[in-house]
Amino acid sequence: MEGVRQCKSVPYFDGFVVTQEDETGYIDTIIDKDGLGFITSLFLRLGSHARILEPKEIIDGLRKQAKQILTMYQDEK
């Protein structure tokens, strides 16, 4: 699917993207805490094509960035 295709195009994920028979997939790797900000940005660009299950720090980072974007594009009255 689209999220798997995009993840396979990211050199950082090379060798870590596991594709299932239904063409969905997941990333099987350990992420260093120092790289969480970088990884969060990668996943943010996937939008609804990816769902993060763990770690919580990435989920929290995605929520924070999404709120910042919503605030930036809020309609001014």
Image (cartoon, rainbow, N blue to C red):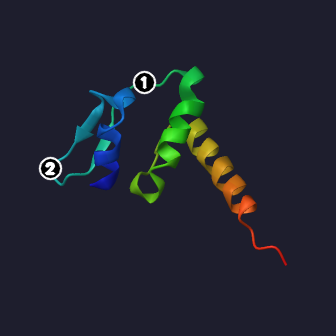
**Crowd class of label 1 (few under 14; some 14 to 19; many from 20; radius 10 Å):** few
Secondary structure beneath dot 2 equals: loop
**Crowd class of label 2 (few under 14; some 14 to 19; many from 20; radius 10 Å):** few
Label located before the other in sequence (1 or 2) = 2
**Quick one: which residue is furthest to the right in this view?**
77
Q: Is residue 55 visible?
A: no
Q: Is residue 41 left or right of residue 8?
A: right
Q: Residue at x 29, y 35 (%)?
A: 17
Q: Position of residue 47 (x, y in %)?
A: 48, 55
Q: Position of residue 61 (x, y in %)?
A: 63, 42
- Viewer-proximal residue among 65 and 59: 65
Classify residue 6 by image quadrant. top left
- Work out which quarter of the rendered image holds the C terminus and state it: bottom right
User: Type of residue at label 2?
Assistant: Glu
Q: Is residue 21 visible?
A: yes
Classify residue 1 by image quadrant. bottom left
- Viewer-proximal residue among 27 and 65: 65
Q: Is residue 36 left or right of residue 71?
A: left
User: In the image, which disc is placed on residue 20?
Assistant: none
Q: Residue at x 29, y 38 (%)?
A: 8
Q: Is residue 3 left or right of residue 67?
A: left
Q: Residue at x 39, y 56 (%)?
A: 49
Image vertical order of residue 76 relative to residue 73, above or below: below
Secondary structure beneath dot 1 equals: loop
Q: Residue at x 26, y 27 (%)?
A: 15
Q: Are marks 1 and 2 in contact (CB under 8 Å)?
A: no
Classify residue 73 by image quadrant. bottom right
| Tag 1 residue | 30
User: Type of residue at label 1?
Assistant: Ile
Give how far apart the Cα atoms at labels 1 and 2 are: 23 Å
| Tag 2 residue | 21
Q: Position of residue 36 (x, y in %)?
A: 56, 30
